[in-house]
Image (cartoon, rainbow, N blue to C red):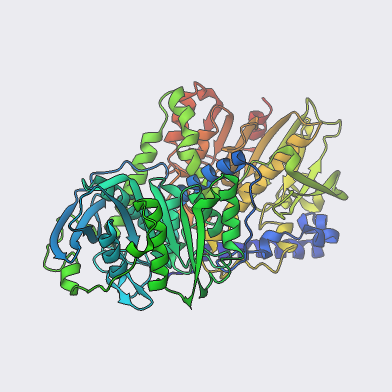
Amino acid sequence: MHRSAYPPQLVRGRALAAGLVLLVLMLESSEGAGGPVQVFGDVLPRLADRRFTQVRDGNTAYTLSVPVSVAQWEARAAELREHILACTGLWPPPEPAPLNAEVFGRIERDGYSIEKVYFESFPGFYVTGNLYRPLGRTGPFPGVISPHGHWARGRIHDEDLGSIPGRCITMARQGYVVFAYDMIGYNDSDQVAHSIGGEAEYLWGISAMGLQLRDSIRAVDFLRSLPDVDPARIGCTGASGGGTQTFMVAAVDDRIVAAAPVNMISAHFQGGCICENAPNLRIDTFNVEIGALMAPRPLLMVSCTGDWTANTPKVEFPAIQSVYRLLGAEDRVGWVQIDAPHNYNQASRLAVYKHLGKWLLGEDDESKLGEPPFGLEPDEAMLVWAGHERPAGALDQRGVIEALKAQARAQIAASVPRDAKELAALPGSLGVTLAHSLNVTRPAPGDVRAESLGPVTTGSLRGDRLVLGSTSRGDAVPAVAWMPPRGPRSGRAALVVAERGIASLLGQGGDPRPLLRGLLDAGALVLAIDAFGTGASVAANPASQREGVKFFTTFNRTDTAERVQDVLTAIAYLQSRVDVDRVDLVGLEKAGLWCLLARAFAPSVSRAALDLDGFPGTDEAYLSDLYVPLLLRAGGVQTAGALAAPGALLLHHVSPDLDLSMTRAAYAAADAGANLRAERERLSVSEVLRWLNR
């Protein structure tokens, strides 16, 4: 059983944040010290943040936002395809290794043959299955990959509600070459468990869904490598979890020219297995939009009355049809609904034969697309490893995980820029993975909502209380803006983000600590925020719904990612002010890490001084202090630092164990080595101010 997708260390972190707020409350009640609760105590209800309570999951009902133009859809489709590949650990796309396919054990029957197959998805990890071919016909034939879903016996399962051998035999008789392959953990694919994956693996983009999607892409490679298969006519069909695989591989691999996902595309159920729920996958999207990525290629949506596809004729089909209509391909999408429970029964199969027959065989005569009786072979004749020795070097589960990590490390090492051209390519490689890891946006100044909550006096300072957010997210970021005594000089502003929030800038009685005083004295407008889950953000949102949600990170950003977004939102707010021409960024303690991740997406920041809090960059440190799925697959904080080049970047309290080689290489490639400074010690306030005041 897979553990809760919301990491326990984040639950502990939220408890710690709540404890800090309680401590501030105790101090204020006894000594009157300044802090976030005192600053916002009378307006806490106005800081309600929907991110704490409107938590998405696999049973949330979603509505497709219909694109208004072809250009808008094409841009969204490209972004989504990239997102799926990144979330499943397939971006940058891995270099395909030789398949080293073995096809053997041929059985010949009436009008078809069956063979056993294995080939390497990547070195040491094997895709296993059966190849069904027509007999008595001359090719080349169209090919069909056939993922099986969660049937008890996988690709050899046969019953009235669903027969994988039945549909493969029938399609081979009709003139297809069909490859039925094991989902991971089923039958011969036993190198890993079907439940593979957890927070530690997700950091590297390793998941059950990622492995299966890679296998499906490689299954297309395999079919196209066969001399009797027409590489321009490849289809895919599967039901339930195999339906998820069908629309996922069709979404990212345009070599699939016709598809028929069965009983899976739903607006209110996104799949209940770990193999359907890669981390980050459905943040700001859902299966209907992913299914629409098949457009304008032919798609049949098969549904039934007895499961979550009961609304397909009225909900899911019209939504996807709107995309096909936009693209002028309305005749290429259709639906059928079978009065049955969850299935891939004969009635469903007949509908699929008709669809694939039209688009892959060019056959409209339904009498040629029926399903005659078929027989079954004994298990020994179908199972690949029955009486056959496994290849030497086949990996076990730990070996698979380590091999995938090694592949990721190799891609990261290959992305280290050596010159300006390679530096320019970094945003399109690891930068893409980092963007889809964090799932943050760089708001345009006009997209930021800034509401005044009134003035506040803290010690000797007078500031403006604000709540910041975007126009669509429902976020509410507590903030205080302090003006320098004689007004901002040269339009300068500094955003300060602290691990414990705004209170970190204030001393006893609310007087400014040296950093705040120094920035104000230098003529900077200073904006401080209580990032997500810190300071008043916790006090104003005590009823969080973020714990205990199944597959939490499939649908929601982690606390770290939300904090990075808050930093970007605050930067955008400062840029929207007419009195601000320059924005500097200061991160204190662990907030320096959030700010470094944000800096990768904020090229307009002038100078940044970021405390990395001795973060060692180990897997364990990411899990406990900076958990975001895919973050290590993207290269972590060193990639973020590299993407900041050539901007002025001070990193201090840098652990000797933290690898910053990519960051240093990027600054060297940009011929901007003088703009990067990294110090092991935590620098004094005066040193930080000296850096910022240049």
Question: Is residue 619 visible from the viewing direction of this image?
Answer: no
Q: Residue at x 71, y 67 (%)?
A: 542
Instruction: Identify whether 609 is placed above or below 21.
Output: above
Q: Position of residue 122 (x, y in %)?
A: 27, 49
Q: Position of residue 69 (x, y in %)?
A: 64, 42
Q: Quadrant of the C terminus?
A: top right
Q: Position of residue 624 (x, y in %)?
A: 50, 58
- Residue 607 versus residue 581: which sits nearer the camera? 581
Q: Residue at x 38, y 67 (%)?
A: 149
Q: Residue at x 81, y 65 (%)?
A: 29
Instruction: Identify whether 99 is placed above or below 644.
Output: below
Q: In the displayed image of the protein, which residue is found farthest to the top?
A: 671
Q: Position of residue 187 (x, y in %)?
A: 26, 69
Q: Quadrant of the N terminus?
A: bottom left
Q: Is residue 128 left or right of residue 404?
A: left
Question: Is residue 488 visible from the viewing direction of this image?
Answer: yes
Q: Is residue 256 left or right of residue 598?
A: left
Instruction: Identify whether 624 is placed above or below 226.
Output: below
- Residue 614 versus residue 454: which sits nearer the camera? 454
Q: Is residue 681 left or right of residue 226?
A: right
